[in-house]
Image (cartoon, helix red, strand yellow):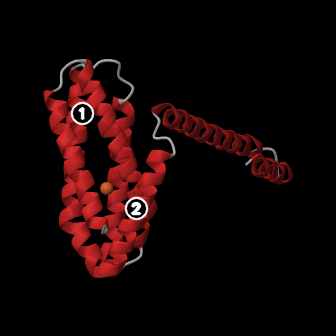
Amino acid sequence: MDAFSLLKADHRKVAGLFERLESARGQAKLRVFEQIKMELDLHTHIEEKIFYPALEKPSETHDITLEAYEEHAVVKNLLKELSRAKTANDEWEAQAKVLKENVEHHVEEEENELFPKAEEALGEEKIEALGERMATEKERKQSRGATKGAGATKSAATSKSASKTKSASTAAKRARVSKKATGSKKRTGARKSAAKKR
Ligand SMILES: [Fe+2]
């Protein structure tokens, strides 16, 4: 399967799920949302791992690919916030609507701008090969435990270690600032120890 057909099929599937989200009521809404999240997690994963890296270099697709990464980041944030909810209240509905609009915009840009430029830049054969790789990666991820629990644990662990790294570097910065006034010898020492910590 070529990359475009695969990604377009994903796009249609998610569009269908968003329609179901609108008509669902109560807790059923959250279950449809979980499905949307699962599909989008998989979709953004294969794009960011396989499709976008191939499009970053060619000048025709460079800028729009960087934009696509940013749009993914916005979508991922919304997914994360929405998935915290226990009930779908009015605020949740509003945020879900923003998610839908963001996804629609992104899909439109991909299909109407990125895909034609990608075809120009890479040619049919490479597009086909990228499609095969993405299909394989999708299967691998799905079978490897798209089990909800495993996914949640992993992402919690990742964000925990990310916040650890952040606080470590903040501490190192503070150390540098506080040592600044006490002479260059000590300052060098503080830098060294901060570097060691990292
Ligand atoms: Fe995308």
Q: Quadrant of residue 5?
A: bottom left
* Count of marks overlaid on the render: 2
Q: Which mark is residue 60?
A: none
In which quadrant will I find the N terminus?
Answer: bottom left
Give the percent coordinates (x, y) of residue 176.
Answer: 72, 46
Give the percent coordinates (x, y) of residue 31.
Answer: 30, 27
- Of the residues shown, which amino acid type is indicated by label 2? Met
Q: Residue at x 27, y 19 (%)?
A: 27
193 on left or right of 78: right
- Whether residue 106 is visible to the viewer of this picture, yes or no, is no
Q: Secondary structure at mark 1?
A: helix
195 on left or right of 104: right
- Give ligand 1's quarter of the image: bottom left
Q: Quadrant of residue 137?
A: bottom left
Comparing marks 2 and 1, which lies closer to the viewer? 2
Q: Which residue is mark 2?
A: 134
Give the percent coordinates (x, y) of residue 97.
Answer: 20, 35
Q: Residue at x 48, y 53 (%)?
A: 140
Rendered position, 156 above or below 177:
above
20 on left or right of 44: left
Q: Which residue is mark 1?
A: 96
Tag 1 or tag 2, which sits nearer the N-term? 1
**Foreground residue among 75 and 137:** 137
> Mark 2 and mark 1: span between their CA atoms?
27 Å
Rendered position, 44 above or below 98:
below
- Whether residue 40 is visible to the viewer of this picture, yes or no, is yes
Q: Residue at x 39, y 45 (%)?
A: 41
